Every structure is written in structure tokens, then in C-alpha cells.
Image: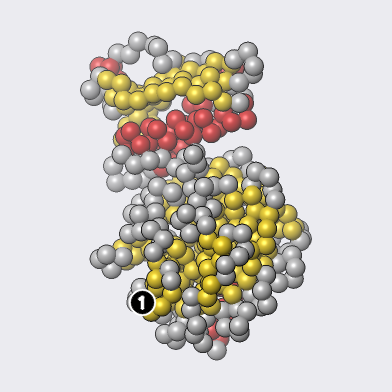
Amino acid sequence: MMKTLLFRSIAVLGLMIATLAHAQLRVEISGVGANQIPVAIAGFADEASAPQQITAIVKADLTRSGFFKIIDTGNVMSETTPVNFDEWKSRGAEALVVGSVQRLADGRLDVRYRLLDTLKSSNLSGFGQVAAPDRLRVAAHRIADDIYEKLLGVRGAFATRIAYVTKAGREYRLEIADSDGEGTQVALRSNEPIISPAWSPDGTKVAYVSFESRKPVVYVQDLVSRQRIVVANYRGSNSAPSWSPDGSKLAIALSRDGYTQVYTVNADGGGLRKLTSTTSIETEPQFSPDGQSIYFTSDRSGGPQIYRMSVNGGEAHRVTFNGSYNISPRLSPDGKTLAFISRREGRFQLYALDLASGQELRLSDTTKDESPSFSPNGKYIMYATESGRRGTLAVVSVDGRVKQTLTTQAGDVREPTWGPFMK
């Protein structure tokens, strides 16, 4: 009985959202990738005219990834500065980043950059972009994304956004920030809990559960217009929204008929369809990236485990077998890896399961983990945890080598979700 009650409290309501103050998230990095690429980054010419330094943002992004060793050039170089490739090779740099910032007459900033291969003495990439002053960080993140992709062969995710829930006093806030925790904006304020935010595939909306009606109700909110609609407000609990890959539907968990079961609903709140009909708790549904399957948490085997079924319902197949308590399924963008939270020896920790081989990897060293969320390039997982009785966000690479924590100066932060690539 106690196990069922504990499972219900975690799966439907999320782990406790503790008190925290509103502040920018501070990033702390530990661990590096198996192989680090040495990259020299010169100061961008004339960036003193900009409100923020492009160079510093790019360096911070690449350092945070864990896959680059930054070589400080100690000088300023624009994209037109002649380059002595032999000199940079002798300093151990395999790539060199140069660029410039120019303020235009209308107040916008013309940002230009080049990425050079010092080993081959050639140009690898480069582009120019015009940005408003308040979009300068995004311009810098795009440069870091390009460097990441050209040197690692994987699309960078620095210019993406994250969402999470905070609480200050009696006020809960759904906040949106850049992937590095900067540029925080408040999407929703409420005197009642907010849980389970989930980004739409196009990054323009967030679904979430709010208790402002004194019960859990699922909403979808447009982040540009701030308008929102009620997607599910049935008798009992309405919880755990997740989007279909095409953005047309949400998978949700409802207790309208007594037992919490899995449903799908159109993104406008219509077309409700029941997918499971059991006397067990069926919750936390997640679409597979191809839209053909739904993964969910169920206690039908006696304790919570993760199952997979067709998007049309029908027979469910158990996916997790190690450990007696596995919850919160999240699929990597390529559909090959399942991230989840497992309770073993009294510790709630983040695991990754290779769905083809069945190989499992524990990714965290903490003990109260929850709410995993993959980066859109599939290389990192963000999750909530606790440190010194305070809620923090953490990021770990899928191989477990690179780790980051995102904290506030005071208080806790919970319920993270990593947004998609932006168009």
C-alpha cells in the first residue's frame, strides 16, 4: 500500500517542489569528454561596442559542453585578420575562432565569425548575422552551435531554451531561459503549484499542469501571445502532458474513471481517446520520436515499471526489468535510448537504457533525481536533483563523463524540460 501511494505521489504530482528565490541560474562544470579538441578563440574585434561580449559567451558554451579545451589567444582578431597557421599549430590549437562586432546605424549589431582549421590551413566555416542588442546572446550561441557541429559532427544545442518551475514565498513561476540559464523570462505566475512543463515540437508553446483551480488541470500556453487553453479538466486528476512529434496531440494521464489511465487528446482539447483500461496506475506517457509508440509508467507488475504500447493502444510490453521501481520515461531524439529514474538501495538516480542491446548506465551520483529531459541533439540529459537539501538542475552527457549543475543563489528549482531546436 505504501509503495502504491509513493508511486502515485511521484508519478502524478511530481516530487516535492520546495521554496526558492527567483534568480539567474549559475552553471558549475565537472568532468570532461573522453577527447577534448583544443580550440583557440580570439577576442572579437570591436565587441566593446556591444552590450555583451560574444567571445565570453562562445567560450562558456564550448567549455560547458566538456568536449573542447579552450586556448586563450590573448589578442583580438577579426575575420579578415591574416592568420599564421604554423604559429597556431605550434600553440596546440587544432581550430581557431575569429570574428567582429559592428554597431549599425539602426542600433542593431552585425556579428561576423570564421572558424579555421589550423592543421589543414583552411577555412572550416563562417557566417554573418545581424542581431538586436537583446538578441546578442542568441547570436553568440549560434556561433558556438556552428563550432560544435563542424568539429564534432553533431548539431549544437546552445541556442535552445529550457523551462523549469520555481517558487518564491507563495508564488510559483514557470520560467523560460536560455540553455545556459541566462535570459530568464516568466511565462506564468500562480499561487498554486505548477508541474510537468513540456515543450511543443516547434518551441512556441508549453503544456503544463496547474493547480490554480485547486485540482490538477492541463493547459497549453502560447509563449509569444501568452494566451492559453485548457486541454484537460476532467473529474479527478489531469496530469503528465507530453507532445506528439507533429505537435497535433498530447498524451496525458487522467483519473476521470477512477484509476489513472493513459489518454491522447488533440492539442486544442478535443478528440479525447483512452488508450489503457486497467485497474493499475498508468501514467507519465511519452510519445516515441517516430510517433508510433507510447512509453508509460505502470504498476501492473506490482511496482512501477516502464512499458511500451502502440500509439493506438492495445498490448503493452515491459521495457525495464532491473530494479523494482522505475519511473519517468524519456526518449532520446533518435529513439534509441531511454532515460528514466530508478530507485535502488533507497536512492532515486538517473539511468540510461540502450533499447536495442538492453545495456544500462547509471548517469548520476545524487540520490533524489527526477524529471529527466534530453537535449534536442540527444547528447545531454537535464534533470532535477537535490544538493544540501536544495533543489538544483543538473546536466549530464549521455556517456556520463560531462556533468554540470545549475543552481540559484538561494532556494530550489524543479521540473526542467529542454526545448527543441528553434527554426
| 123 sits to left or right of 100 | left
Tell me: 154 left or right of 265: left
The residue wearing badge 1 is: 317
Q: Quadrant of the N terminus?
A: bottom right
On screen, 74 above or below 39? above
Count all numbered tags in the image, as a single digit: 1
* Element assignment for label 1: strand
Residue at the bottom extreme of this rendering:
1
At 37% from the left edge and 36% from the top edge, which residue is drawn? 148
Name of the residue lying farthest toward the left? 120
How crowded pointer 1 is (Cα within 10 Å; few <14, some 14-19, many 20+) is rated as: few
Q: Position of residue 152 (x, y in %)?
A: 31, 38
- Is 115 rendered above or below residue 342? above
Residue located 51% across and 87% down the image: 279
Question: Can residue 35 be seen in this snapshot?
Answer: yes
Residue 396 screen position, x and y as percent:
42, 53
- Three-letter amino acid code of the residue under disc 1: His
Q: 368 left or right of 313?
A: right
